[in-house]
């Protein structure tokens, strides 16, 4: 902070430029996200209407070869993805992939929404092969980022977090103290600001 000829002090130019710097960083991140995400989204290898999609009809008879619908529902309900879910019924679909029979399990709530999903192999074991899951049609209810809306929300959250973190680390701002000239207080911590602003 430079002193003026009258013995006072001037406002630091670094602090004045800081907000613009944060906005530029956030804008650059958003631009990069908007350019990269659509390309990756189209190349992610997900088949929306695969044989085990939720839109497929529920099994009413055993596939050949295959398990009975009753046994399939019991096997699905025992899987870890459904252990802590509150749902009304289990929908089981079936189909062939790579010459083998697989089953899609969907925990359905009273309002018809899917609360969770899993894919079982012919031995009723949980499938964890990401490439197979993406082709199955069940990935939308299993993957971490399942829809374009979720990808867009991720963009907003990451940008807000970046602004908050860089703002919280700005050395030109500090907590207001008595006799400090009424400086604006900085966030108590970058992580707290991030959570409050973007929920990330």
Image: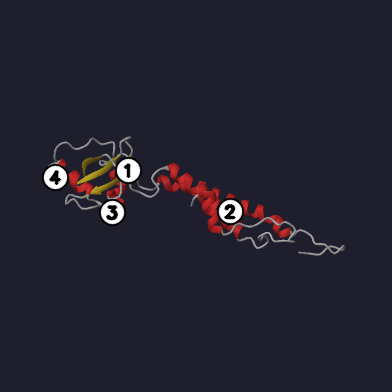
Say what secondary structure mark 4 lies in: loop
Q: Residue at x 31, y 45 (%)?
A: 116
Cα separation between marks 1 and 2: 33 Å
Which of the two discs, 2 and 4, labels the residue nearer the N terminus? Answer: 4
Q: How far apart, in angstroms, are the residues tagged by discs 2 and 3?
A: 37 Å
Check residue 163 in the rendering and tell me which mark sits there, or answer none: 2
- Give the label, 1 or 4, closer to the camera: 1
In the displayed structure, does residue 112 sit left or right of residue 43? Answer: left
Q: Residue at x 41, y 44 (%)?
A: 42
Tell me the residue that label 3 is attached to.
129
- Residue for badge 1: 115
Instruction: Please name which of the two marks, 2 or 3, marks the residue nearer to the observer.
Output: 2
Q: Residue furthest right?
A: 6
Mark 1 or mark 4, earlier in chain: 4
Q: Quadrant of residue 17?
A: bottom right
99 on left or right of 189 = left
Quarter in which the N terminus is drawn = bottom right
Q: Is residue 146 left or right of residue 11?
A: left
Task: Find the distance from the CA under tag 2 to the CA under tag 4.
Answer: 54 Å
User: Is disc 1 placed on a helix, strand or loop?
Assistant: strand
Q: Earlier in the sequence, mark 3 or mark 4?
A: 4
């Amino acid at each position: 902070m430079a002193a003026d000829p009258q013995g006072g002090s001037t406002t630091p130019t670094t602090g004045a430029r800081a907000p613009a710097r944060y906005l530029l960083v956030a804008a650059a991140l958003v631009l990069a996200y908007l350019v990269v995400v659509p390309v990756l989204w189209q190349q992610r290898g997900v088949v929306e209407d695969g044989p085990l999609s939720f839109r497929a009809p529920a099994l009413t008879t055993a596939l050949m070869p295959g398990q009975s619908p009753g046994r399939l529902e019991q096997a699905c309900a025992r899987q870890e993805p459904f252990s802590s879910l509150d749902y009304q019924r289990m929908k089981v679909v079936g189909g062939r992939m790579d010459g083998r029979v697989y089953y899609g399990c969907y925990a359905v709530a009273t309002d018809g929404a899917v609360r969770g999903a899993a894919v079982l192999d012919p031995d009723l074991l949980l499938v964890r092969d990401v490439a197979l899951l993406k082709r199955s049609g069940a990935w939308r209810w299993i993957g971490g980022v399942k829809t374009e809306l979720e990808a867009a929300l991720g963009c907003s959250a990451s940008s807000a977090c970046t602004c908050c973190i860089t703002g919280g680390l700005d050395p030109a701002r500090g907590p207001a103290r008595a006799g400090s000239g009424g400086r604006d207080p900085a966030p108590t911590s970058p992580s707290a600001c991030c959570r409050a602003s973007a929920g990330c």
